[in-house]
Image (cartoon, rainbow, N blue to C red):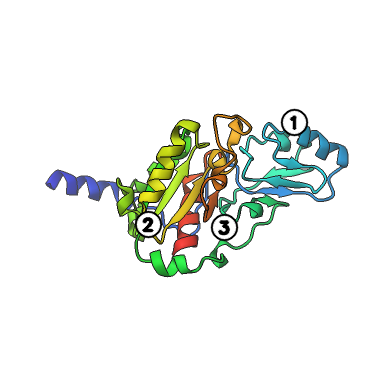
Amino acid sequence: MLKTLRNRFEQGYRTSPYPAAPVKLAERYRGRPRIAPDAPAEVVAQCAAACPQAAIDPLRRRIDLGRCVFCTECERLSQGQFITFSQDFELATARREELITAGDLPDLANHAKQHFKRLFGRSLQLRQVSAGGCNACEADLNVLATPFFDLARFGINFVASPRHADAIVVTGPVSRNMRTALLQTYEAVPAPKAVIAVGACAISGGPFQGSPEVSDGLESILPVDLFIPGCPPHPMTNLHALLTFFK
């Protein structure tokens, strides 16, 4: 016990001050894209053709964050003339179509499902379902329980049983082999409940979209209340989404 107390004293306070204070992410972090509406048409077309996710609409000059894996190939090709990626990690939306953007996103705090704040504002229990993911999204969700992020201080916890959960957090493209398990987990969560899609795979199928072995996105199977884009979403993106949507 004394050794534990001494170690705690030596390490000091390590928990992030967010959301009471802003945080600065690593320089290499790639967040919300900025799109130049007056970029040359040939540059826009080149970016759209090179996008591995077909996430760029060259006619409307929009990018689908539900498909984007933030590879920054478009930024490299356009040399910043069309798309540049910022440090903004606040990417989540309450509606799938809002992820198709010209760079702007609606304020998540003003989403239509405000009753979730009344229901789960003091305590939110989550059951995570890995539906065929590569473990990247899962790993960045797991670190929310570490002392730096300390998700539990906000009354949010991950639980082992869906019967103890208020919402399910789904990662991965929902492979054919995981579909039944996912549906059974959803049914086991008592109402009222919420569904959260985390990562490009869960939102759109990600790199696997179009394959008969995966879904066309979680919304084609279950009603989704919160979309958190990324490949994988940064832990701060996940934390911001949960706090803004439910708290």
The 10 Å Cα crowd at callout 2, few under 14, some 14 to 19, many 20 or more, is many
Foreground of the two, 75 or 241? 241
Q: Nearer the viewer, mark 1 or mark 2?
A: 2
Residue 140 to residue 213: above or below? below
Callout 2, which amino acid? Asp
Q: Earlier in the sequence, mark 3 or mark 2?
A: 3
Residue 201 relative to residue 97: left or right: left
Q: CA distance from mark 3 to mark 2?
A: 17 Å
Nearer the N terminus, badge 1 or badge 2? 1
| Number of the front mark, 3 or 1 | 3
Q: What's under tag 1, amino acid-wise?
A: Ala
Residue 24: % across, % down: 52, 50
Q: Which mark is residue 50?
A: 1
Circle 3 residue: 94
Q: Position of residue 23 (x, y in %)?
A: 50, 53
**Image location of residue 150, percent across then percent down:** 35, 52
Position of residue 11 relative to residue 112, above or below, is above
> How many C-alpha atoms fall within 10 Å of the one at disc 1: few (<14), some, or many (≥20)?
some
Q: Quadrant of residue 214?
A: top right
Apparent side of residue 244 relative to residue 69 in the rendered image (left or right): left
Q: Which residue is drawn at the image coordinates 73% and 43% (left, top)?
A: 83
Q: Secondary structure at mark 2?
A: loop
Give the mark, 3 or 1, whose residue is nearer the N terminus.
1
